[in-house]
Image: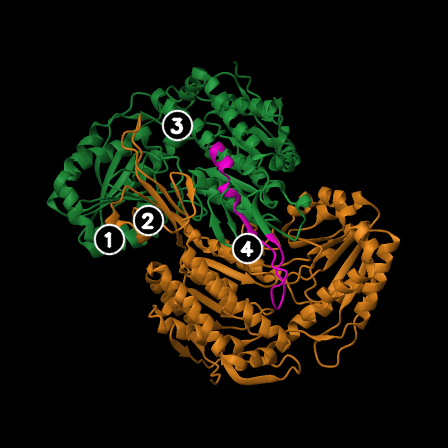
Chain colours: A orange, B green
Amino acid sequence: MTLTGEFFIGQERLASREQFRGIEAETGRPLEPPFSLAGAEHVSRACELAEAAARDYSMRPLSERAAFLEMIAANIEELGDELLERAHLETGLPPARLTGERGRTVGQLRLFATEVRDGGWLGLRVDPAIPDRQPLPRSDLRSRNEPLGPVAVFGASNFPLAFSVAGGDTASALAAGCPVVVKGHPAHPGTSELVAGAIARAVAASGLPEGVFSLLNAVSNDVGAALVADSRIRAVGFTGSRGGGLALMKIAAARPVPIPVYAEMSAINPVLLMPAALEEKAEALGAAYVASLTMGAGQFCTNPGLVLALESPALDRFLAAAAQAVSEAPAATMLTPTIHAAFEKGVGQLLDNACVVPLARGREGQGPHQGQAALFLASADDFLADDHVSQEVFGASSVLVRCAGEAALARVIARLEGQLTATVHFTVADEPLVARLLPQLAEKAGRLIANGWPTGVEVCHAMVHGGPFPATSDGRSTSVGTRAIERFLRPVCYQDFPASLLPDLLRPGAQRGLPHRLDGRFLAE
Amino acid sequence: MTLTGEFFIGQERLASREQFRGIEAETGRPLEPPFSLAGAEHVSRACELAEAAARDYSMRPLSERAAFLEMIAANIEELGDELLERAHLETGLPPARLTGERGRTVGQLRLFATEVRDGGWLGLRVDPAIPDRQPLPRSDLRSRNEPLGPVAVFGASNFPLAFSVAGGDTASALAAGCPVVVKGHPAHPGTSELVAGAIARAVAASGLPEGVFSLLNAVSNDVGAALVADSRIRAVGFTGSRGGGLALMKIAAARPVPIPVYAEMSAINPVLLMPAALEEKAEALGAAYVASLTMGAGQFCTNPGLVLALESPALDRFLAAAAQAVSEAPAATMLTPTIHAAFEKGVGQLLDNACVVPLARGREGQGPHQGQAALFLASADDFLADDHVSQEVFGASSVLVRCAGEAALARVIARLEGQLTATVHFTVADEPLVARLLPQLAEKAGRLIANGWPTGVEVCHAMVHGGPFPATSDGRSTSVGTRAIERFLRPVCYQDFPASLLPDLLRPGAQRGLPHRLDGRFLAE
């Protein structure tokens, strides 16, 4: 398989005169081949095809839709080492991590295939007619969830496989029955092309209308903006910066017909260290914290950017251990020069900020744009004095807030913005304090973690990778796990239609074997 | 029980120097007593109390929350005829209609009580730990839906009971576990005060924190705007005009922390008449159509404002019958002078519009601001030539579009905005044509109706009273039926917590008896 540098509009591969190149993350050198950039006319054409495909795709039997998702997974696996090698070149992420990420990517495609067949997401509800009800008869009412229509997906830089072209947003939108137009992330265009090929082949082999999938390349924001503004797009999935997410929300809200934006944007993922836990294992916690902080150069949405604890001698031991671990942490190649520059700028602003004290810095890097971990200390009052201290610095930077007592700790929590996660380390002796804090934390975050670390997100049924604004644009949703499919659905009710005109799964008896509600009663199958 | 003209902030009843009066709909005369207007400080105080109540209320056992809803219903029934008489005075709606509406109001409160106990809305999911999984163990993950927090509800003028102070939005928000701050509609302040008293008494008798419910009176838009802008409000429920809904969406999107707005705004609810059905019963359809059109002076969100049909002699018979029925339709008192003026203006604009031909007008009224039904005719081309023709005129005004063939009919449907409902009248002979049109209609509306009329909304499990923008601001939701509760929830996941710290219903075994997913498997109880 050889990269062509073309983008995908349905089954067509297109080249254009405007081009750009991927960058080898470790060296900063441009990579072959040059990639063609999509323009406004390509956005329009991809959306036109997506709209033309939407109804046909939405009406395919669930078994067909599930098999399509499974074929995408198999096609990605078939790309073999070429995919991992290209992704490593473009992102600097280590091969072991990328192997794991590929496993997650194909795993979530297969999980959604199972979910599509299981059918709970259909939300089937049947309220049979009651012709003799007084004073008025009841009609026969049946409802199910239908796909919203074409979805725009923005590839994320930090998960070139699991949250990019065939990542969680694409998998859940396709599972819901929505065509997808991906705006590829310019940090990994070769990886994107390879994965797009895997999807496009699955579309063709499954006999689906070609508009079910397109991939557009862009380096400027114009193409993404045009995509979100296009009247044929009905929802947006995005993982990236707060600025980027807010810009898309604004475009979507200003459309003649506004659409939902699911943007996963910004979090500092507070980690609370309870006194007895600190007493018992301050040093081990310090080391584990820095391992979570520096994993993947800190480039995770769930990176622990904030630690909260009550002052104590044990906390000082934790601080010493964490500072030691940070000072020994090797520099790590960041995803792109831009991300590295933003990280340096963010760390620099903290270094200049009188509200925080620098505690430790990681080892200097050898190559270009390697990120050096950074650890800061603040009092609760200083942390609360300047909102800049609680802003996410994307990368391995974290602030530890030392609180004089429970009241100060609660005050800090109360002031936090919405978060993806909140973590608590505790022992049995800490439980009364944790019980007091937990309801407050539950109002701030989508996922609460006991005695673990926020990095590492299980793709399963109970997962919530979401959280109140600005962690995401829409705290009612998750972008990881099977509930992610709910983002791309709307309910439609059919009143008094004969079986011959009802959608297959709403016909009398057709709900058998699927979770549904019959006259309000829950039936598992 | 005597009206005081005060508004409610928790258990406190407040008077202010700024006052207004309700209007007797049939005469236009001001009613006693004067009602106090809330100001910005009252908005703030109500929101403060609501926020203070939110956590406590959200953590009450489901049985307690359900009993509270049932007590509100009983208290409303206890208001007896005084409520119906005051509502009739203020709205002009006939006593029989108001009796039915009261039944719906208490019925939906009781339905939500049952729903709260049934617990499907909790979305309980448990993925147990897999400690020996390779290469990495799986954590114990459990998630459930939690209430969003305080909800602002805007009373609607056209359902003084079922979509006002204790209406569908309030019932579903309270069922979800959210405190409610209602902005009462100035068209029925006395009705609002009576119902607010019923709720406030239930709050006190249930031992709930007083901030669970407040009612603010306002005549200007400022109070509503301040309410939606208040940082403590987490979601908005609104039924009203397109302009009003769009304004609230704008305020909500511009907040530092944007919040969801569920606005039900604007629909013309197309009714399609298929050829064989027309052939069989043109006259009966014409009469039934006008009955639906003129019911409640046409003041329904689901009023049939548009009829689409293929030209034929049978259609001409339908037209003649409908025109005849309209011309015999008595004028009917509209809800407010403002609504009547807007209706007259809308009808006047259609009378002046060269794209439509006036077919018939209802009888002239005897009293002030009585609405006279209005029926217009247009060709498909003329209908498509001017977007004004497809704008909702709130009241008994409807446009019939005569299409030259199926292609013209499909073109008209394609151009329609999002709708609450779409109705089709057909016989077996029409089914092939209906089958071709139905998928297109399903993309445009939240509810499809066979051989019925859109007015009349069943409060049940399968109901969808929603639809793509601008029918509602958020086509993923319904404001009627048990699914309405979903609007006010967000998922929260707990990872690896001991039973002692988990919310009650997430503890091991606590899901028994409730619908849930265990490791992905659906269990009805």
Q: Measure the alpha-carbon separation of dots 4 and 3.
A: 43 Å
Q: Are marks 2 and 1 in contact (CB under 8 Å)?
A: no
Q: Residue at x 81, y 70 (%)?
A: A327
Using the numbered discs, state the Cα–Cα distance from disc 1 to disc 3 in whole angstroms.
Answer: 39 Å
Residue B342 sits in quarter: top left
If you read the primary sequence from the N terminus, does the residue marked by circle 1 or circle 3 appear first? 3
Does A359 sit left or right of B241 as displayed? right
Where residue A79 appears, as percent x and y from the top left, is 49, 79
On residue B335, the disc is: 3
- Residue B275 point in image, percent of width and height: 16, 47
Give the letter of the chain under mark 3: B
Residue at numbered disc 4: A478
Q: Residues within 10 Å of mark 3 (few under 14, many from 20)?
A: many
Q: Is residue B472 above or below residue A1?
A: above
Q: Chain of mark 4?
A: A
| Residues indicated by labels 3 and 2 sit on the same polypeptide chain | no
Q: Residue drawn at (55%, 74%), measured in percent from left and top?
A: A186
Q: CA distance from mark 4 to mark 2?
A: 27 Å
Callout 2 amino acid: Leu
Which of marks 2 and 4 precedes in the sequence?
A: 4
Magenta-drawn segment: B113-141
- Say the numbered circle drawn on residue A506: 2
Towards the viewer: A115 or B510: B510
4 or 2: mark nearer the eye: 2
Q: Secondary structure at mark 3?
A: loop
Q: Which residue type does callout 3 highlight?
A: Leu
- Residue A47, compared with residue A409, is above or below; it is below
Q: What is the chain identity of the residue bearing mark 1?
A: B
Q: Which residue is mark 1?
A: B435
Mark pair 2, 1: CA separation:
15 Å
**Amino acid at dot 4:** Thr
Identity of the residue drawn at 42% across and 50% down = A490
